[in-house]
Image (cartoon, rainbow, N blue to C red):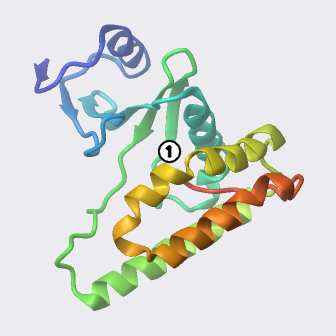
Amino acid sequence: MTESTRLPSPLHAWVESALGPLDDVRDSSHDRDDSQVWRVTGPAGNRYVKVAPKPILYTRETRAYREAVPHLGYGNAPVLRDSSAQLLALILTAVDGEPLKEEESPARRRTAHRQAGQLLRHFHDAMTCPPDKPEAAAVVENTVAGLDKLLAEASDHLSAMETDLLRRLVSTLLDCGPLPAGWRHGDF
């Protein structure tokens, strides 16, 4: 096997048990500390192996791949080939295409955003059953608890008046009672 990157041992064993011997492994992680993604090549072709940073993110992502992705149309999203709750890992098919680059023309960007909007509409249409209520309640708690960090990250874009308004509005969330639950997407 030609390796530019090694998969952690338990992950490697699980991936080979699902796909067969690997010919190549390449790091395809995003530029984030918690991103763990590899492109693997073997008898099944190119696949992606992704490890979720937390169990809740693994649960969300596997549910989306199982319930929403089949409604997006062939070739519009990766397909879940296998998953391991113990490893928080997913094996996904590759999808043709290239990410948009900063220098793309306005027309190309509009076309891509229109296509993305259509896929997002299909996603929301597919997710007909409500999300878990405890997870929805945690979103409010996490928003309140993480407000200072979010405001610090956005400080270059907010005036003092806007920051104060956000603090006042977010402080009222806990008093609103149960909010209606809805689906959200993380890495759209």
In the image, is 8 to the left or to the right of 119?
left
In the image, is 29 to the left or to the right of 55?
left
Relative depth, front residue between 12 and 144:
144
Mark 1 — residue?
79
* Residue type indicated by callout 1: Val
Regarding residue 182, the answer to whether it shows in the image is no
Which quadrant would residue 27 be assigned to in this image? top left
Looking at the image, residue 11 lies above or below residue 183: above
- Percent coordinates x, y for residue 26 in the rendering: 19, 32
Disc 1: CA contacts within 10 A as few (<14), some (14-19) or many (>=20): some
Relative depth, front residue between 103 and 155:
155
Relative depth, front residue between 119 and 95:
119
In the image, is 17 to the left or to the right of 26?
right
- Percent coordinates x, y for residue 42 in the rendering: 26, 27
Which quadrant would residue 20 be assigned to in this image? top left
Looking at the image, residue 91 lies above or below residue 7: below
Q: Residue at x 43, y 38 (%)?
A: 92
- Which residue is at the far bottom? 107
Number of disc labels: 1
Q: Which residue is drawn at 58% across and 61% down?
A: 72
Q: Which residue is drawn at 65% across and 50% down?
A: 144
Regarding residue 40, the answer to whether it shows in the image is yes
- Percent coordinates x, y for residue 97 in the rendering: 30, 62
Looking at the image, residue 144 lies above or below residue 91: below
Q: Is mark 1 on a helix, strand or loop?
A: loop
